[in-house]
Amino acid sequence: MTAITNHMPTAELQALDAAHHLHPFTHGDALNKKGARVITRAKGVTLTDSEGHDYLDAMAGLWCVNIGYGREELADAAARQMKELPYYNTFFQTTHVPAIALADRLAQLTPYDLNHVFFASSGSEANDTNIRLVRTYWEQKGHPEKKAIISRKNAYHGSSMGSASLGGMSAMHAQGGMPIPDIHHIDQPYWYGEGKDTDPAEFGLERARQLEAKILELGEDKVAAFIGEPVQGAGGVIVAPDTYWPEIQRICKKYNILLIADEVICGFGRTGKWFGSETFDINPDVMTIAKGVSSGYAPLGGSLVSDEVAEVLNGCEFAHGYTYSGHPVTCAVALENLRILDEEGIVTRVGSETAPYLKEKWETLAAHPLVGEASVCGLMGSIALSPDKANRAKFAAEAGTAGLICREHCFSNGLIMRHVGDRMVISPPLVITKSEIDTLVERANIALDLAHKQLK
Ligand code: PLP
């Protein structure tokens, strides 16, 4: 049998890939026509493909490689742990040092009294945990009828049945019988796209108050929790108006429902503070984490809960767990990642230097004839492509075509940006330098010029 390696011709790798590999969020026709891009190596913020082309990865993989690529300390931490204890579970009253140490570190890092973590291997698993966790919490408190969870349209909370049901992506709900029962969706706080000529502050309040209306419609005694991303990431990097989160917080308190902040993208420095909840002054009862906690070097997710929620849950045996909950190798990798983020001042630098710099540069893109809006929160940015920016018009062609065209021009100019419909988004590694930000914005401008010519 021939070994399949990086040295094989790209076309052969692509043919094998198309023959045997079912890809997430990829149309089979596209794979057969063009083949997948084969990534072979990475260092810092740069990816290299099998043809030797370099790309500035403005997406940090899938919003996750916060410390950048190629940090050998994480490989060493994994190797050390694999040699000492490669696996043991945390079921049935058992534990091990990496899980103890990571739980302790997370309790220190997270805000408020989110001092307890239930480990999973991904954000999807963690959000599935959250569904069972908040319902079990209310059952334990004598309110088994409090089951409903309210989320937002165009939210992304994962791909499993539970987490995709929590999400509000219509294309996902169209496949496979979702959402599962007792999940409800209100409108998103997307002022640019849906606010028309309302005042953003008023719009923020109106969208938050849809939560109150939904609670009253379902019955206060039926609602377990509200879930939201501090900034909607996969929905297009949508930052709610300032009035939104305080009102959501007020409503959750008033009606005694748990607030789940899904920090899978926002956590671990992305918004310029350690957590989006700190940036937006949200005080959640439950927080979902994944991605940046291990910078994607090993799969890890988790649900952080408050002292009060933990106390109630600990009053029973929570009949829930994953083989890899608190996997020792993953925990060791995450601990090393968190040490680097902290000791190298990476999160602090995002808040004080690189995020303000990105904002200054990124917002210049708003002057481009194709760009209706350019916005930034920490090291996350987005632009809305529009054929008529004064009226915030959308492209008449099939939604997403303009974004797709622009994304392809980014690729051919050495930049990885993602499109969400006709919004282009970025979320680079947190170690990106100012000069790399200059390169990112220059390349984005070139791609926009080319897309503009093509779309005319
Ligand atoms: N929650 C949010 C906010 C996400 O952005 C994602 C993934 O992008 C998830 C949950 C799901 O995480 P995972 O892909 O690790 O299952």
Image: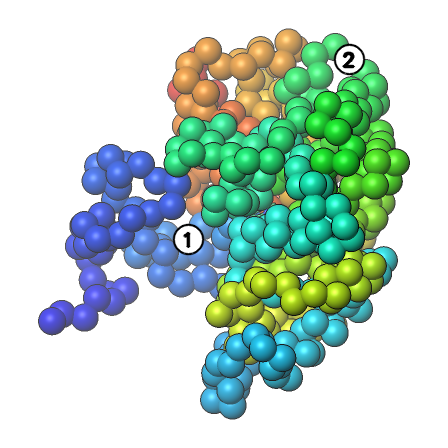
User: Observer-nearest residue: 196 or 431?
Assistant: 196
Mark 1 element type: strand
Q: Residue 158: image x %, image y %?
A: 53, 46
Callout 1: 10 Å neighbours few (<14), some, many (20+)? some
How many numbered marks does the figure carry?
A: 2
Does mark 1 have its CB less than 8 Å from ligand 1? no
Quadrant hosting residue 202:
top right
Colour mode of the rendering: rainbow
Query: Residue 54, which numbered label?
Result: 1
User: Observer-nearest residue: 317 or 79?
Assistant: 317
Quadrant hosting residue 154:
top right
State the residue at coordinates (51%, 34%).
Answer: 179
Query: Residue 277, which numbered label?
Result: none
> Can see residue 379?
no
Q: Residue 121: image x %, image y %?
A: 53, 62
Q: Which residue does the numbered mark 2 point to in the structure image?
A: 198
State the residue at coordinates (86%, 40%).
Answer: 253
State the residue at coordinates (26%, 52%).
Answer: 21
Q: Judge from the rendering whether residue 44 lies leftward or rightward of residue 11; answer left or right.
A: right
Measure how far apart labels 1 and 2 are at the Cα level. 44 Å
Q: Residue 378: image x %, image y %?
A: 72, 45
Q: Judge from the rendering whether residue 430 lies leftward or rightward of residue 249; answer left or right.
A: left
**Furthest residue in direction left, as rendered:** 1
In the picture, which quadrant includes the C terminus?
Answer: top left
Mark 2 element type: loop
Mark 1 or mark 2, earlier in chain: 1
User: Observer-nearest residue: 262 or 407?
Assistant: 262
Q: In this view, does 236 lie above or below 107?
A: above
